[in-house]
Amino acid sequence: MANVAVIGAQWGDEGKGKVVDWLASRAEIVVRFQGGHNAGHTLVVGDQTYKLSLLPSGVVRGKLGIIGNGVVLDPEALLSEIDRVTAQGLKVGPENLRIAENVPLILPLHPALDKAREAARGQDKIGTTGRGIGPAYEDKVGRRSIRLCDLAEPETLSAKLDELLLHHNALFRGLRAPEFAKAELLDALLALAPRLLPFAEPVWERLDEARRTGKRVLFEGAQAVMLDVDHGTYPYVTSSNTVAGNAAAGAGIGPDAIGFVLGIAKAYATRVGSGPFPSELFDETGRLLGERGREFGTVTGRPRRCGWFDACMVRQAVKVGGVQGLVLTKLDVLDGLPELKICTGYRIHGEVVKRLPAALRAQAAAEPIFETMAGWSGSTRGARSYAELPAEAVKYVRRIEELVEAPIVLLSTSPERDDTIMMRDPFAG
Ligand code: IMP
C-alpha cells in the first residue's frame, strides 16, 4: 500500500477537507508539512462540526496527527484550537498529536508585521490572511526563528529573542508601528512551554518507523500550487512550497515515501486575496457560482473571487506539483447552467500561450481563451457513479481530464463524505 499526498491544484479552497477526511479514515498517520493557521477547513462528523486550521484532519478520525517542521506554528492558535475541539468532546494529547521539535514558531510580532506591511502596501496589498505566515517563514530562512525546541532552553530562548527583536523592532520603527518588549515575549513563551513541549519530538524518527512497519501515511497539503512561493503567481502567493515535493522536506522523510500525489481542483475556479486570475467572472454567473458554492473564506470570511475552470493553469499545477491523479470537486455547483466555459490558454499581447507566464505584466495581460461546452439540466448532486451523471456532465469531466493531462481519479458530488465517485483507489499506488 502506498502513501498519499494531497495538494490543491488551483488557488486553495478546492474542498481538500472532505477528500483529506475521506482518505484519513483509511490512513494511520496524517502529516501537515507546510503552511500554518492560514489554512482552514470544516469537518462534519456525526452531529459535530469541527473547524480546523492547524490540527491534521486525522486527529478527528482517531488517527495520529503530525505537525512537520515545514509548518509555521502559532502556539496560541494551536492551543486554542485544541481547547475548542476538546470542548466538542475530542481528545487531543501527545498520544495522538506529535509536533516536530524543529518547527519554527509564529510569535505575536509576526501577525503585527504582516498587517503593518499590508497596510503600508495600500492598493498593492497581497491580501494575506494576516496571520504572520510570511514574516515567520522569512525568519526561518533568515536563521533567526524561535523553534519549538528552544522553549526547553530558557537561556537559548533569551539570546535568540535578542537577535529576533534587533531585526523586528528596526522594522517596526520604520513602519511607525509599536515595538515589542523582550520580557513580555519571553514570559509568554515560557508560560506556554509546559503545555507545548510534551508534543515535541523528532518526528522524522516516527515517520521512519512508520515507513519500516508499513503504516499508511497521508500528507495533508494546505493552500495550493498557484499559491506556491516559487511556482505560484508571485508575489501574490503564500510563503511556503505547496507542491508535493515539499512533503518530504517539510516532514523529514525521503521523496520516495510520499507515494501517490493527488491534486484537488474545483469544477470551476476561485481565489481569495489579490493577484492574477485570468478566467475570473465579473458578471451574474460569477455571483451565482459564489452563492451556490458558498464561496467565503473559512479563515477570514472574505468572499472569494469566482471564475471558469482554467485548464491551462491546472495543467501547469499538475506538472510542477507532481500530481498523478486529480479529484474534481463541487461539480454540482454547475448544475443547470446553460453553457460552461473552460479556459484552454491565454492571449498575451496578441500571442497565444499555453502556460501562465512568470513575469508580472505578462501575467496581468493574460486574456483567457475559452472553449464553450453545453451545460446539463439534470442534477449531479449526490451521484455515486458515472452512470448517475447527465451525459453533458460526463463530457465536461472528460474534457477537463484531457486538457489537464492527468486522470480524474475521484469525483466529489456533494459535501457529504460518501457522495464520491471513485475511479481509482489512491492508496493502491
Ligand atoms: P498568507 O498565506 O496569509 O501569507 O496569504 C498569502 C496569500 O495566500 C493570500 O492571497 C491568501 O488569501 C492566500 N491563502 C493563504 N491561505 C489560504 C488558504 O488556505 N486558502 C486560500 N487562500 C489562502
Image (spheres, rainbow, N blue to C red):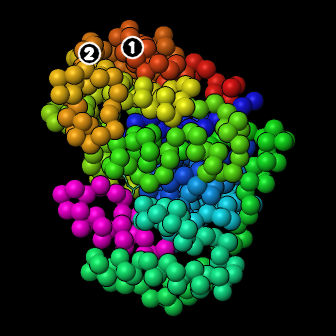
Instruction: Report the amino acid beneath label 1.
Output: Arg
Where is 154 relative to 314, above or below?
below
Residue 399, labelled with which disc? 1
| Position of the C terminus by quadrant | top right
Task: Look at the numbered disc 1 and give the secondary structure of its residue.
Answer: helix
Mark 1 near mark 2, Cβ–Cβ under 8 Å? Answer: yes
Question: Which label's residue is closer to the chain start, 1 or 2?
Answer: 2
Where is 176 relative to 348, above or below?
below
**Residue under circle 2?**
371
Question: Which residue is found at the position 69% from the left and 81% from the top?
Answer: 153
Task: Look at the numbered disc 2 and give the secondary structure of its residue.
Answer: strand
From mark 1 to mark 2, how far is it between C-alphas?
10 Å
Question: Which residue is found at the position 36% from the left and 66% from the top?
Answer: 114
Q: Main secondary structure of the magenta part?
A: helix
Please check the rendered image and state whether residue 119 is part of the magenta-colored stretch, yes or no.
yes
Please check the rendered image and state whether residue 47 is part of the magenta-colored stretch, yes or no.
no
Furthest residue to the left? 283
Magenta segment, which residues?
107-131
Residue 39 appears in view: yes
Residue 264 appears in view: no
Along the viewing direction, whichever of 295 and 13 lies nearer the viewer = 13
